Image: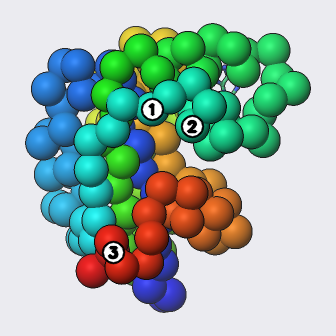
Amino acid sequence: MAIERTLSIIKPDGVQRNLIGTILTRFEEAGLKIVGGRLQQLSQAEAEGFYAVHKHRPFFGELVSFMISGPVFISVLEGDDAIAKNRDLMGATNPKEAKPGTIRADFAKSIDANTVHGSDAPETAAVEIAYFFRSIELV
Ligand code: CMP
């Protein structure tokens, strides 16, 4: 299996409910290493830029409003098959469809307040990591 890096965001609902430690522990216990991370209050322009791929979707405005409603914790996770592993840990985008034991099944309240974001493919992981981190900020 290939060593990969993926971008993770703990969304405002997760940060606001003091879930940073709980969620990072799940990543670490699954064998993912945190190779960079910080808390950040996203501006509207930063959130719109990050989610630009969704800009024509009907939920774009609400998604951006939610993402700037409080600080987020952005990190880069590294490990074997990190992209798929992180997605398995997160569960389905809609928490109503997320498997029991996943982060979204356990903590998410709605499809917008779904607690975590994770890159969905190697190409998007590379773009998303570069959006938030310079290479010298990752160990
Ligand atoms: P995320 O993985 O951060 O990627 C885009 C986000 O848009 C997604 O999680 C959801 O929080 C949000 N979203 C809201 N409505 C939808 C929808 N119908 N389909 C996909 N994502 C949605």
Q: Is label 3 within 8 A of ligand 1 (CB to nearest ligand atom)?
A: no
Q: Position of residue 123 (x, y in %)?
A: 69, 68
In the rendered structure, which disc, 2 or 3, sits on the residue that comes first in sequence? 2
Q: Tell us which disc is closer to us: 2 or 3.
A: 2
Q: In this image, 23 relative to 60: left or right?
A: left
The answer to which image quadrant residue 82 occupies is: bottom left
Residue 42's label in the rendered image is: 1
Q: Residues within 10 Å of mark 2 (few under 14, many from 20)?
A: some
Q: Residue at x 72, y 20 (%)?
A: 60
The amino acid sitting under disc 2 is Glu
The amino acid sitting under disc 3 is Leu
Q: Position of residue 76 (x, y in %)?
A: 37, 63
How far is mark 2 from mark 3, CA to CA? Answer: 20 Å
Q: In this image, 4 relative to 89: left or right?
A: right
Q: Nearer the viewer, residue 50 or 111?
A: 50
Q: Are marks 2 and 3 in contact (CB under 8 Å)?
A: no
The amino acid sitting under disc 1 is Leu
Label 3 SS: loop
Q: Are marks 1 and 2 in contact (CB under 8 Å)?
A: yes
Q: Position of residue 34 (x, y in %)?
A: 25, 66
Q: Which residue is mark 3?
A: 138
Q: Which residue is mark 2?
A: 46
